[in-house]
Amino acid sequence: MSVIPATPAQPRTEASPFRLFQAINAFQLTEAIRSAIELDIFTAIGAGHTTAEAVASHCGIAERGARILCDFLVVNGFLSKSGNQYSLNEHSAKFLDRNSPAYMGSCTEFLLTDDIRQNFRDLTNAVRHGGCQHTYAHAPESPVWVAFARSMAPMMMMASQGLAEIVVGNERRTMKVLDIAAGHGLFGIEVLRANPRAEVTAVDWKNVLEVARENAKKFGVADRYKTLPGSIFDVDIGTGYDLILVPNFLHHFDEPTIALLLNKLHRALKPGGKVATLEFVPEEDRVSPAVPAAFALIMLAETPGGDAYTRAELEHMFNRASFSRHEFHAMPPSPHSVLVSTRD
């Protein structure tokens, strides 16, 4: 007679409504961060104004308001507190103090615009129809694109450096590069900084390219940085490129639209030329890693047919456009990945 060992009793967990409660009220943290950035509270604390009274005096706000907001940010892990003294933690000091070179508070100027918020308030309709039904068609000269380029640049610094390391490495030969939807220009600029013999042509709307030019001058590469105003779908980009950068772009479109673009890029490359595509790429299960997987919801809410494409989907689209070799690179700690596809 065999004896089956008893299974150790598992601790019982009670169902709780608080996870749901936190999710429903998540907008409160969004608004608290936005207010703290607008009022320069993180910068004030970083400069030594560490009590509610000192924050209030420095920022020109009510002491009660400063205390309650700062305590809420402590509860949510954006500040620390000892006695009545507040301090920045490692992440807030790096990304939310305006005096930090890695300051990212400016991204709220685009990510929290009324247009984006409205898309998410209408998410039910997007889910019902499989895509956004009321995209906001801003004209090319709209200041929203300039705001996007300026506000998102700090968030892309790490990714642009990682991409340049992958596509340039130790390469120092002459390199003709095209940067699609260049925006702030950092992806092309980092390639120029990595290879002093590279030249970049950046494509974007005319007013946005002014931001890219400013950054190229700031980083000392303006003499090798050219611009081509217009939509990548419409402008004549020429031929003979060694490398084409496609950062954070394909996710806006459905597969038929992407196919048109990839065929155009194939024609523009030299034999042996490469396309470097930087994207949020989820695993095949589409629920991991968390950030790339969750990005699909943003595309559902904000575009008619965009998506977070898996590696297999991206490679399939490039294969159909006659690219036959691919290298895939994860970029931790960045949530992005890079697919480098070669034209034979």
Image (tube, grey):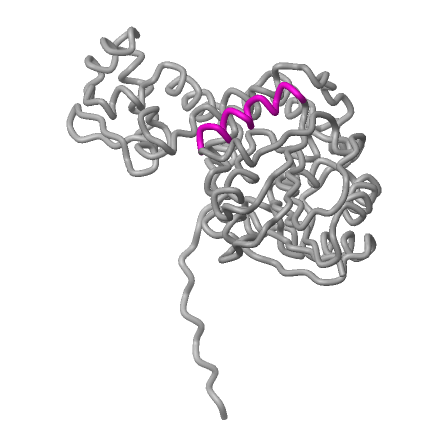
The residue positioned 54% from the left and 47% from the top of the image is: 197
Q: Which residues are magenta?
A: 206-219
Indicate the position of residue 322 as horizontal and vertical percent values. 81, 56
Residue 308 in picture, x, y percent from top left = 67, 44
Q: Percent from the top left, x then y, of residue 265? A: 76, 45
Decide whether the magenta segment is chiefly helix, strand or loop. Answer: helix
Which residue sits at x=24%, y=15%?
Answer: 55
Q: Nearer the viewer, residue 157 or 2?
A: 157
Judge left or right: residue 161 versus residue 227. Answer: left
Picture coordinates of residue 314, whole percent (x, y): 72, 52
Q: Is residue 1 above or below residue 276?
A: below
Number of marks in the rendered image:
0
Residue placed farthest to the bottom in the image? 1
Residue occupying the far left of the picture: 83
**Residue 211, magenta (yes or no):** yes
Q: Residue at x 31, y 23 (%)?
A: 42
In the figure, is residue 316 to the left or right of 19? right
Quadrant in the picture for the C terminus: bottom right
Instruction: Judge by depth and name the residue closer to the eye, 228 or 259.
Output: 228
- Asked if residue 215 lies left or right of residue 48, the reply is right
As for residue 35 lying within the magenta part, the answer is no
Q: Is residue 185 above or below residue 146?
A: below
The image quadrant of residue 88 is top left
Residue 20 vs residue 83, the one in the foreground: 83
